[in-house]
Image: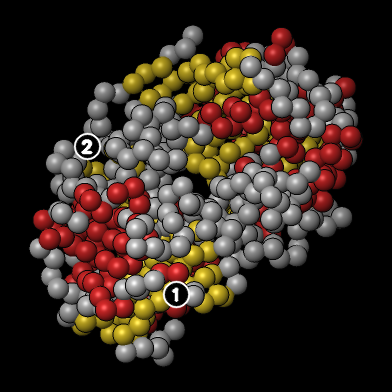
């Protein structure tokens, strides 16, 4: 039954096809017992896709669900960039333990969350951390809710059909349990003092009075409290009531109140055949929001397709013998006045991601629309990365990664960006004196490489999670394009989260990568005399979550380094706004100099 297919090589004509696809048996260990699940990877699925954990009722095996539930066929039927991975779970000995106590370390809720962690590994496919969803029918719906209540910060949506009967004592325990898994970092000391019952999860509770597990015991009210919805509902479709949040979300603009929602409906027989008749509606509800990693417990926002919802232009064109992908956002004011040259921001995603992911994560399009500049979001080609850390494993399936080390068997990334920038200058009203680059993680390393090897083309750059982590400087700085760089200064603003010490040291020092990268840019910008002798003596300025160090020349901030409190290895819209308003908008290039104007906004 299990048909796992592996492609042997990346095809330059179709470089975004997955290496692995098919149905794969996987295992996790819970309480010393080996438990199984099935992973269905449709052919053609893209990187950083959604993942749906599917739980059937008692007596339903993972094989039954894969064969009969309809989820595999639904995944296959989607357009390429909307395909998803289905993850099928099963109860031990055929029966879900829906009466288990909250926090049972060897129980079924622990099994579900162990499968979530295993499905997030990247050996066979890549489910993006913002796109994990849970659905279940009958006893599986009860267990899906129990798992979500015990680990709410990682799921972006939940649907339970005929699975409303969660024990009131379980809900009470969950509601008051301090959250330690904060989506991207741990909080064992409860510094943020967030309870599980305060973490919003968009949920659709479908009661099925035909089954004993289908009577609501207060689960809809639990999720409404967590989402902070109003007490009154509106009918969004026949028989379906929606409870909406009307107050602004706690961390606007990084969260959107429209994503904090709970649906309630009642339909006899809805849970039959693993709720197969409802799969399309379930998928649509789940995928309508994502939980982006950036702040404590993540940030819920509405899902927006770059082309359909945001009006971005999609390009899939050949460059250097490889098909390459990028999105372009042109604000309305630039479209109306093409005779006026506009700034351009190149925004570069991190390892495993894509232009589509970075557009939604950073919301640079909003900043562009408000400030009248063009944004381009390119997608890297697939590769295996030889740098082992918490996020990168050499055993991972090939996933998008910029060729920052100029490996000979991969396309020349600098030539790609030269070509892309030339095409942008030719096709759009771009001001070549106001071109900027920013990126996150692996995209931050690409941003550094662009600033090092093509300094004359960029007025300023902003690498996020952005120092030379993992010893990357040992392979980038010796490159001929860097060694032969023009003696041109580039203003640089680097960011990192204070919750990513596994990759980046938030406190610069003479013997760590953060201090090295800051010192490097001070040297390149002819400010070596400002390299601190004692890094501990440098007190950063604090502005809310932002702790900033900066090095000025004649009052101009040529090098900045900012850490963000309670921030994991991530980025967010607030960072995009801050980069534009406080940095990019101030600089333009004139030859070897970047001109600064404090009056520009």
Camera-side residue: 16 or 167? 167
Q: Is residue 266 above or below residue 338?
A: above
Determine the image quadrant of residue 464.
Answer: bottom left
Q: Does 226 sit above or below residue 271?
A: below
Residue 482 in the image: x percent, y percent?
A: 16, 60
Tag 1–tag 2 contact (CB < 8 Å): no
User: Is residue 376 or residue 415 the one in the foreground?
Assistant: 415
Give residue 12's mark.
2
Disc 2 crowd rating (10 Å Cα; few below 14, some 14-19, many 20+) is some
Mark 1, residue position: 538
Q: Is residue 45 visible?
A: yes
Graded by Cα atoms within 10 Å as few (under 14), some (14 to 19) or many (20 or more), the crowding at tag 1 reads: few
Q: Nearer the viewer, mark 1 or mark 2?
A: 1
In the image, 417: left or right of 214?
A: left
- The residue sitting at 55% across, 75% down in the picture is 542
Res 443 → quadrant: bottom left
Which comes before the other along the chain, label 1 or label 2?
2
Left or right: residue 281 versus residue 235 is left
Q: Residue at x 49, y 65 (%)?
A: 563
| Residue 369 picture location, percent across and down | 46, 71
Question: Element type at marker 1?
Answer: loop
Asked if one can make out residue 300 in the rendered structure from this viewpoint, the answer is no
Q: What is the x, y in percent for residue 416?
A: 20, 54
Q: How many marks?
A: 2
Q: Residue at x 82, y 51 (%)?
A: 225
**Quadrant including the C terminus:** bottom left
């Amino acid at each position: 039954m299990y048909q796992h297919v592996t492609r042997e090589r990346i095809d330059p004509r179709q470089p975004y096809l997955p290496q692995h696809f098919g149905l794969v048996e996987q295992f996790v260990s819970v309480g010393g017992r080996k438990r199984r699940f099935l992973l269905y990877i449709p052919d053609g699925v893209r990187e950083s896709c959604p993942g749906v954990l599917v739980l059937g009722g008692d007596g339903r095996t993972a094989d039954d669900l894969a064969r009969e539930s309809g989820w595999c066929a639904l995944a296959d039927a989607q357009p390429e960039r909307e395909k998803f991975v289905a993850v099928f779970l099963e109860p031990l000995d055929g029966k879900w333990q829906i009466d288990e106590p909250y926090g049972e370390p060897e129980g079924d809720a622990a099994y579900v969350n162990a499968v979530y962690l295993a499905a997030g590994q990247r050996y066979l496919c890549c489910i993006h951390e913002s796109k994990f969803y849970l659905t279940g029918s009958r006893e599986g719906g009860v267990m899906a809710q129990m798992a979500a209540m015990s680990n709410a910060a990682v799921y972006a949506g939940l649907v339970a059909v005929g699975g409303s009967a969660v024990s009131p004592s379980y809900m009470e325990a969950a509601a008051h349990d301090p959250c330690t898994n904060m989506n991207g970092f741990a909080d064992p000391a409860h510094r943020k003092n967030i309870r599980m019952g305060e973490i919003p999860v968009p949920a659709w509770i479908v009661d099925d009075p035909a089954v004993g597990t289908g009577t609501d015991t207060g689960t809809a009210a639990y999720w409404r409290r967590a989402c902070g919805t109003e007490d009154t509902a509106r009918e969004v479709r026949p028989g379906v009531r929606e409870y909406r949040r009307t107050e602004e979300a706690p961390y606007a603009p990084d969260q959107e109140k429209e994503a904090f929602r709970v649906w309630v409906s009642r339909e006899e027989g809805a849970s039959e055949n693993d709720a197969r008749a409802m799969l399309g509606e379930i998928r649509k509800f789940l995928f309508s929001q994502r939980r982006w990693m950036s702040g404590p417990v993540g940030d819920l926002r509405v899902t927006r397709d770059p082309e359909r919802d945001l009006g971005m232009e999609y390009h899939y064109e050949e460059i250097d013998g490889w098909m390459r992908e990028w999105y372009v956002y042109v604000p309305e004011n630039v479209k109306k006045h093409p005779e006026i040259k506009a700034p351009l921001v190149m925004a570069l995603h991190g390892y495993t991601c894509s232009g589509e992911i970075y557009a939604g994560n950073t919301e640079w399009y909003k900043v562009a629309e408000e400030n009248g500049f063009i944004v381009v979001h390119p997608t890297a080609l697939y590769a295996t990365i030889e740098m082992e850390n918490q996020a990168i494993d050499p055993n991972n399936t090939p996933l998008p990664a910029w060729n920052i080390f100029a490996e000979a068997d991969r396309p020349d990334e600098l030539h790609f960006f030269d070509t892309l920038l030339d095409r942008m200058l030719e096709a759009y009203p771009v001001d070549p004196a106001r071109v900027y680059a920013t990126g996150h993680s692996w995209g931050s390393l690409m941003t550094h490489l662009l600033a090092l090897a093509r300094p004359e083309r960029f007025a300023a750059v902003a690498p996020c999670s952005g120092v030379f982590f993992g010893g990357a400087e040992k392979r980038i700085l010796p490159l001929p394009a860097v060694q032969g760089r023009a003696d041109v200064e580039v203003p640089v603003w680097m960011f990192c989260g204070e919750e990513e010490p596994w990759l980046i040291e938030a406190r610069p020092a003479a013997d760590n990568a953060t201090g090295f990268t800051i010192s490097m840019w001070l040297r390149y910008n002819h400010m070596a005399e400002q390299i601190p002798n004692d890094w501990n003596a440098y007190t950063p300025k604090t502005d809310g979550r932002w702790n900033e160090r900066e090095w000025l020349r004649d009052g101009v901030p040529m090098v900045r380094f900012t850490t963000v409190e309670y921030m994991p290895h991530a980025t967010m819209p607030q960072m995009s706004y801050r980069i534009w308003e406080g940095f990019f908008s101030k600089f333009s290039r004139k030859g070897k100099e970047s001109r600064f104007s404090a009056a520009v906004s």
